[in-house]
Image (spheres, rainbow, N blue to C red):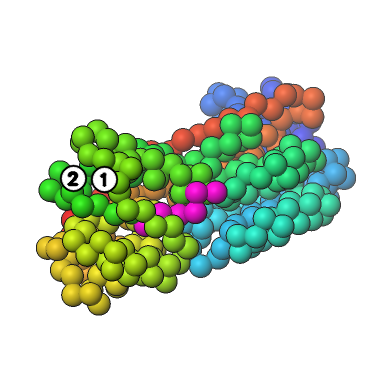
Amino acid sequence: MTIKEVARLAGVSPAAVSRYLNGGSISPEKSERVRKAIEETGYRPNPMAQTMRTGRINQVGVIVPRLYSDSVSQITAGASARLFEHGYMTLLGCTEHDPETELRYIKILQESQAAGIILMGAELTPRIAEVIRSSRVPVVITGQNFEEFPCVYHDDFHAVRDLTRLLIEKGRRRLVMIGAPETDIAAGLNRRRGAEQALLDAGLNASAMPYVVSTFEAKGGKESMEYLLKSYPDLDGVICATDTMAMGAISALREAGKDIPGDVSIVGVGDNWVDTVSVPGLTTAHLFFRQCGEEAAGLLLDILSRESDEPVRARQIRLQYLIVERGSV
């Protein structure tokens, strides 16, 4: 049984069967006909034949900046599950935030004939952009909105704007922010701008808000909070670019004898599992990380299902967010 025979039985083109198998775009009516044909014939794709025909193996590389992250694990899980449904295995590479390692992984995956790459991007340097642009295999980026490439990203600006508005509504005026490196456009720059916009909307001086750049670890959040407490002892609200930073900041506030939320309110971004068991629970913006991975895999599968001469449009998908209010405000 071949893919052409399945297509003939279903009354569709072989390309339509390929798109169905790879999770690509196909109408519900055609999808049902292909499903029935596959069920009747027991057809299963031959991995070796696919490799010989396409010059690639059914493996997708997922390149991540770090492993010890709830958001990274959720994105990876979502992508892996979606890819596995369509016969693809996942290869994982960790860069530890090193651009050179990121470049090496992209090149290695191309040379190993991987079908595609999902890159959890942070910084789009000219070198990385050129490597992606010239890549022989499709690359989908998560977490950032790089308009030239297929991306799935979060609405970081509005999420932090709404969190900051919540603090202002609670009567907090002496706000400080623990931010991420601004080479990371999403977590760094966009989240900072969201906080500043909320201050401007409330008629407050956004440029006067104390701002410290932290690493992504809880240790960085704690050290940043310690510095802010010494420099601005009357602060009454803290905006953190991530939940992990916020957990470190909470530790520093407690050690300083501050009551949360009596003396200081604090918010983060992400909605990690630890937010629900910390005391008090952390008010945060829930970002749909698993959906991010699933959508990225879907974009990649759609590209892989296209004919070789069919143009690929760089689609960007922006995900929604939810403000989750807990005891920290």
Q: Residues within 10 Å of mark 1 (few under 14, many from 20)?
A: many
| Residue 289, position as x, y percentages in the image | 45, 50
Marks 1 and 2: CB-CB under 8 Å?
yes
Kind of element beneath mark 1: helix
- Residue 194 against residue 241 in the figure, above or below: above
Residue at x-position 60% and y-position 27%: 26
The residue drawn where x is 55% and y is 49% is: 183
Membership of 182 in magenta stretch? yes
Is residue 303 among the parts visible in the rendering?
A: yes
Quadrant for the N terminus, please.
top right
Q: Main secondary structure of the magenta part?
A: loop
Residue at 68 percent of width and 34 percent of height = 303
Q: Position of residue 33 (x, y in %)?
A: 61, 28
User: Is 292 part of what is drawn in magenta?
Assistant: no
Q: Quadrant of the C terminus?
A: bottom left
How many badges with numbers are in the image? Answer: 2
Which kind of residue does numbered mark 1 sit on?
A: Thr
Q: Position of residue 59 (x, y in %)?
A: 72, 52
Circle 2 is placed at which residue position? 168
Q: Residues within 10 Å of mark 2 (few under 14, many from 20)?
A: some
Looking at this view, is 289 or 120 the one in front?
120
239 horizontally vs 26: left or right: left
Residue 246 position in % (x across, y down)? 33, 62
From the viewer's side, name the closer residue of 122 and 202: 202
Residue type marked 2: Ile
Residue 9 image label = none
Look at 77% across and 35% down and name the residue there: 3
The magenta region covers: 178-183
* Residue 321 is at least partly visible in this image: no
Look at mark 1 in the image and give the residue it sits on.
164
